[in-house]
Image (cartoon, rainbow, N blue to C red):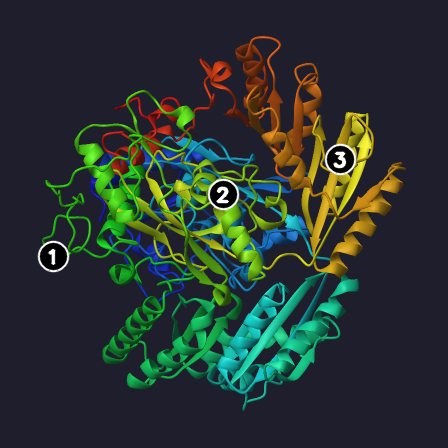
Amino acid sequence: MLQEDALQALKALLPQGQIFTDRASLIAYEVDAGVDKGNPEGVVFPRTVEDVQRIVRWATEYHVPLIGRGAGTGLSGGAVADRGGVIVQFSYMNHIRDIDIYGRSIVVEPALINLHLDTAVSKFDLYFPPDPSSQRASTIGGNVSENSGGPHCFKYGVTTNYITGLQVVLADGKSVRIGGKAFDYPEYDLCGLLTGGEGTLGLLTCIYGRLIRKPPAVKTMLVVFDSVEQAGEAVSAIIAAGLVPATMEMMDQKISQIIEPFAQAGLPLDAEAILIIEVDGYPESLDAQIEEIVQILKAHGGSGIRVARNEEERTKIWLARKSAAGAVTRLSPSYYTVDVTVPRSKLAQTLAEVNQIIDHYGLRAGHLLHAGDGNLHPMILIPDPEDPELMKRIHQAGHDMVACCVRMGGSLSGEHGIGIEKRDYMPLMHSQAELMAMWDVKQAFDAQNIFNPGKIFPTPEKGEASPFTGYSSRYQTPLDETYQLKLSETGTFEPDSAEEAARGLLYLTNHDQRAHIGAPAYKQENDIQINTSALRGIREFAPDDLYITVGAGTPLKEVQDYLAQEQKWLALEAPWAEATLGGLIAANINSPLRMRYGAIREQVLCTTVALADGRVIRTGRPIVKNVAGYDLTKPFVGSYGTLGLLCDVTLKLTVPPRSRRSILIGLDDLPTGFEWSQKLLQRALNMSSLVLCKGVQASVSVPHGKYLLACTVEGHPGDVELEIQQAEHLLHEQGCEQITIQDALHGVDLWKTLLTTNEDTALQVRVGLPLIELPAFVQKQSTLLEGVSFLADLASGLLYLTYTPETEAQTWLQAIRQEALTKEGYAIVTNGPLAIRQGLDPWGYVPEALSVMRALKARWDPQGILNNGMGFPSTLTSAH
């Protein structure tokens, strides 16, 4: 129980009715939707950010754990107070603060119900894709904390792909904004760590997200297979054909036989596997896509194909999938859902082994699978939850299933999280160095272990003082006294493996020798240059699982050329032929392609990183759905080499678009260009870029005008033609008379041209703004931009400027930067000759969570040896 002084201090913080400590009130908060239990000592109901700050300061003073809670629909015990403490129940903080229709963005409070958000934005023909099965009850804050997925993840991705910023209260009670309404802020991607952080790093009070256009039509089908292997092969064949269904769900025979007597959805009880496949897009093109998918399904043994002709039939198909929980509870008072992910090609083999485990322990279960992304959900019936011997067998079966999936190259959890349920399984998947890297993250955010203690990390043994079983409180790499750093003839360090890189970095750390990774132009005098050219080449190509692993020193062009022969593609572009994947990731270089395919942070599945203290860690796994601890990949994206050396990277593959067409418009009136672009953006469904530029020389003939508006659409040929026709019609309605349609020029080509023209003479600057602010910003700065070539990425709120100084660069940059900062944006220097860059602050932006950035840097690079010349930001390493 809370000590009397702590209790009285708590009661003084909030009004009566917002604090409860009586036993009767606390019973409701002992569990979430899983099987784990814990006894909280109190529950508080904050209404404002200031309430949350007061609660956190109180908890830190009295060393009381805080457990954030939304709707309590979690399945891994994440919101359970198994170590006592106070539940912070966010029920009152459930408002939509802003829906920006043009900018396709939202600002919401954490307790907003997922479905309520979807209902609100659907009025504007918009859509928030992360849709966990619990979306009728689950909150956005909970979805962020668990990085929730759902049936539509294969096409649209998980929650982290749609979160651009967070307002969070840190352990010192300070409320800070991380990220925000703009893209690619010059700071560590702490947003990516908090998303999926299970409430262990801070308390979320506000969430910034992005939306997409709601698909205007959807078609659903059900198909039967004689084996799980056949169904899996059909899924792979659909993907290989360049088709991207919104959903591919699988049910095995056991779950079908449980569901059908309950749902009476017409499921064939003799089918070994059933697939539910859904496609969305323009209604005119769906029939052609469905027909192509049907032919693929038949070629791989599919039969009994039912295509819903109307909403009633579609609802009946989905009734089967969504009735699983109700059907199971009809047969058993409780059930235990295991959540694991494997590479898609291993689904059938994994399912066979999981069935053997179930039989070995004498249990009954059925299987639901997100077949498109390899996510399995064995549902184990619990006839008597009070039977300790039965529960022991169930938990042992769960452990064995997890171990099986890890052996297959998968993850402990695809969407439910670790929490209490799987914390002791973490060493099955993560090495000692990786677990300690996660503990470093925890310490950087919450050194006193106030937020949700006991979650994610393995339980300490009795009497053990260290943070978790079997590990010291600070991992120490064994020091090899005989190691000598090997330098090339030019004095550079060129490691050929992650292990060699780690040994070299440790040597430099121990000798207090600073090092520089990346472009030599930013290298400081006496720094050791690190060259990744020996970390080059393709390590693994997995076309069935849609990923490729390459050395970080491999040029993007080299990988794209290889993949072209295999009819695969990375949805990435670089202006420079020599640009390496490690360099692009470290600098977070995003082309306008992100409009359709997402940012580079969404393309990177995992990496191998050498840290300056000699550790080698693997971040992530080569699977799309993975919530097994903190997302360690994210902070390295855009870190400019200040946290560690990327040694290899694993990236998502896609099939090259079948069709690509562009609309080009020349015009002399800038406001008109922005007005037309806003109209186009509202209708974008398959657009891959939308840019407005000035002074950019195209490689082909383009319409005349001071400005050029370029809109590119790509994907399925039917969708491309429909969107081009709709865009053309819309533009004509707006009074646009001269429209050029062609296949040769992509909006990305204009971006590449701008960034490679006059590199030796011009200062290059990237301005990031909330999308809604971009048109007014450009027009307000028209005098400063008069002699400047620029390209506005109209879907991302990014403005690229190339400036050849006629006046002092500092004055020009400061004026641009000041206006951007007032709009919650930024302006950074990305390139230019040293003569112009000298004396300029390249960043001009101080992150609100700078203290956390410094703390993380200090733990992964304790002597501050890495990339001090980058000054990222300029005050990052001031403590060293």
Q: Looking at the image, can residue 568 be seen?
A: no
| Position of residue 415 in the picture relative to residue 773 (left or right) | left
The quarter of the displayed image where residue 769 is located: top right
Front in this rendered view, residue 45 or 726: 726
Across and down, in percent, residue 529 comes to: 32, 31
Q: Please rate how many residues cluster around mark 2, counting C-alpha atoms within 10 Å: few if below 14, some from 14 to 19, many from 20.
A: many
Residue sticking out furthest to the front: 489
Q: Looking at the image, can residue 206 be seen?
A: yes
Q: What residue type is labelled 1?
A: Lys
Q: What residue type is labelled 3?
A: Leu
Q: Which amino acid does label 2 sit on?
A: Met
Front in this rendered view, residue 728 or 524: 524
Q: Which of marks 1 and 3 is in front?
A: 3
Q: Earlier in the sequence, mark 2 or mark 1?
A: 2
Across and down, in percent, residue 592 comes to: 62, 41
* Residue located 56% across and 48% down the image: 598
* Residue located 64% across and 82% down the image: 298
Counting labels gives 3
Across and down, in percent, residue 694 comes to: 72, 27
The residue that mark 1 highlights is 462
Q: Please rate how many residues cluster around mark 3, counting C-alpha atoms within 10 Å: few if below 14, some from 14 to 19, many from 20.
A: many
